Amino acid sequence: MPFPVFQRLALVFVGLLLTEGLAADAKPKAKAPQPKPTLKVWPAEVREIRYHSAADDSKQPAKYYDSGSKKKRPLLVALHTWSGDYRQKTSVPYAKWCIEHDWIMIHPNFRGSNTRPEAMGSELAVADILSAVDHAKANAAVDESRIYLVGASGGGYASLLMAGRAPEIWAGVSAWVPINDLQAWYFETRERKLGYADHIVKATGGVPEDGTAAAEHCRLRSAATYLKKARGVRLDINAGIHDGYTGSVPVSHALNAFNLVARKPDRLSDEQVEYFTKQRNVPDALQSEVEMDWTYGAKKVLFRRQSGAARVTIFEGGHEIIHEAALKWLAKQGKAGSGKK
């Protein structure tokens, strides 16, 4: 029996709706907007200050934290990276640690990114860092037996430099993926066509070929020139095995820096340093010198050696800092009478 007219029309209408629905499903749907990653921001407790630099009687900027407690507390001097300045957000983890543990923190500018003669380990930059320590000591209850220094990349370079320039101040220095020798790094980065080579030219006034004024500037500003004076400083040098390939600073800089502060029997040979650097691996004879360290998280420690107060660690990683490892190591350090080993 045929359907009445109205029923046939109804079926056609339903069919059209189904067809529209299928067609709509076949069309690519617009993606829902994805939330943007949250940028790290400086905690509200951290203030921006200007402090007096003895270098040139100028007022220099810094990020600064002090809870106001009258109890003596550690001071963390945290140093920005090569191309950064005192505002860089990658230093926020230092501030968060200091807030959580009631440490004092100062994060100085020391003349900003290393692209000008006034920066890159100059006498002005060195004096700025020392004056930052003086500012904290004058304005907060600093435990002078627990003044710590930390930095990565350009900050690691400046940390090594300051370990040699003012060894009497620091209870612990943690330097990550640091530059040890500026002249050597110039040629390494120039060969890889990295912009850091141009930075060194701008800061020193020329190409640092042997015998030039620029080469002398590199010598006077290099950590390598002063590190022998840091023997006895509790010094923590770290590098990722792939840095120099996936990153900008060959692992040789960390290993050569260690050799400058290590006792003679503990130093690595030139051949071993070259193997680490070129093969991105630990030489067979050194494979046993591995230590489990949970503070490095997923970044396995591949090699570690201690000599006197200094140690070097090579981990599975690149051009980076593991903040937890750096800060927990520093927290264990102290000068005589501080109760810390």
Image: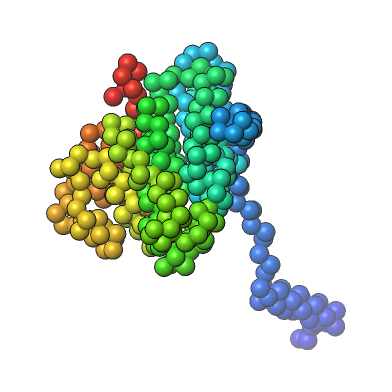
Indicate whether 137 appears above or below 179: above
Which residue in the rendered view is the most extreme toward the right?
Answer: 6
Q: Residue at x 25, y 45 (%)?
A: 259
Res. 109 image quadrant: top right
Q: Residue at x 55, y 19 (%)?
A: 138
Res. 145 image quadrant: top left
Asked if one can make out residue 93 in the rendered structure from this viewpoint, the answer is no
Percent coordinates x, y for residue 172 in the rendering:
37, 31
Please state, as top left, top right, bottom left or bottom right, where the N terminus lies in the image.
Answer: bottom right
Please state, as top left, top right, bottom left or bottom right, where the C terminus lies in the image.
Answer: top left
Q: Residue at x 37, y 37 (%)?
A: 164
Asked if one can make out residue 258 in the rendered structure from this viewpoint, the answer is yes
Indicate whether 207 appears above or below 101: below
Q: Residue at x 63, y 53 (%)?
A: 36
Horizontal placement of 1 versus 227: left or right?
right
Considering depth in this image, is 88 or 218 the residue closer to the camera?
Answer: 218
Considering depth in this image, is 54 or 143 the residue closer to the camera?
Answer: 54
Percent coordinates x, y for residue 178 in the rendering:
39, 48
Which residue in the rendered view is the most extreme toward the bottom?
Answer: 2
Percent coordinates x, y for residue 88 in the rendering:
58, 44
Percent coordinates x, y for residue 43 in the rendering:
60, 34
